[in-house]
Image (cartoon, rainbow, N blue to C red):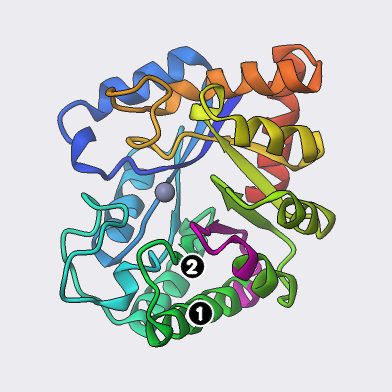
Amino acid sequence: MALVDVHCHLTHINFKQDLDKVLENAHLAGVKRIITAGVNPETNRECLELARLHPDIVKCTLGIYPIDALNLKENIEGESGLSRGSFFDVDKELAFIEQNKDKIAGIGEAGLDFKMIKDDLLVKKQKENFQKVIELAEKLKKPLVVHSRSAEKECVEMLESSKLKKVVLHCFEGRKSVIKTAADAGMNFSIPAIIGRLQHFQMLVDMAGINQLLTETDAPWLSPVVGTRNEPANVALTIKKIAEIKKMTAEETANNVFMNYQRVFE
Ligand SMILES: [Zn+2]
């Protein structure tokens, strides 16, 4: 049985001490591929390095996190612990991603996040940045891993009007009508290991076709067990739940999801 974690953050400080153990746990659980996602200049470079050091299991996507890319002075709660306050130039970073196009599985994470951002100008700026990322993914013909917190409808609209063929909506929290639009447009959904605790993702799995589903952890966040660190090995739990919902065996489900991964990322 081949498992895959298409989205996590192995560069996070919480993995500094025991990354080898985390990779070993994943291997023992049957995980064949882990895609670690960069969110800014610092983590993009670290992700490339991890993929270079562990070519048998780790791949990476490079991105610009929508909040980080605003270069705000005050620290707004985003995927904090990742950004470490590193300022960056969006155009320069997109050029860096392009330079490394042969070393990456895709682009992301990138997208829109309106949870803490209500200011019109900052919303506009996020959309401009995301449009640049979409255009780069189109140009490089790479899959795009999308963050869409509290901006699901806006993200899907922008993606629908693009020429992108391979879109992965990560931890997608959109309502039913938006899920349907995205599913009809052929977008993929990566389902987090926290699915057992969140009815929303169970509904999402039910609505999407089995060929549109991927598994992820977003580790170290979104642990299936409250108060513990999440890690890639936990995608096994997602497979179990998807199998239950789709009335398939865990093995059939895992093989199907792995084929989806290969179709999108390899
Ligand atoms: Zn993430």
Instruction: Determine the residue positioned at 49% across, 84% down.
Output: 128
Secondary structure beneath disc 1?
helix
Look at mark 1 in the image and give the residue it sits on: 127
Where residue 116 sits in the image (x, y, percent)? 35, 64
Q: Is residue 233 above or below residue 178?
A: above
Marking on residue 231? none
**Mark 2 to mark 1 CA distance (whole Å):** 7 Å
Instruction: Determine the residue positioned at 71% across, 69% down.
Output: 164
Q: Residues within 10 Å of mark 1 (few under 14, many from 20)?
A: some
Q: Is residue 153 magenta?
A: yes
Where residue 88 sits in the image (x, y, percent)? 25, 77
Q: Is mark 1 within 8 Å of ligand 1?
A: no
Marking on residue 112? 2
Mark 1 residue type: Lys
The answer to which of 237 and 137 lies nearer the viewer is 237
Q: Is residue 1 visible?
A: no
In the picture, the quarter occupied by the N terminus is: top right
Q: Quadrant of residue 190?
A: top right
Is 256 left, or right, of 215 in this rendering?
Answer: right
> Which segment did they paint magenta?
138-154
Q: Is the residue under label 1 in contact with that under label 2 (CB below 8 Å)?
A: yes
Q: Is mark 2 within 8 Å of ligand 1?
A: no
Q: Quadrant of residue 89?
A: bottom left
Q: Quadrant of residue 43?
A: bottom left
Q: Residues within 10 Å of mark 2 (few under 14, many from 20)?
A: many
Q: Is residue 214 magenta?
A: no
Is 11 left, or right, of 96 in this rendering?
Answer: left
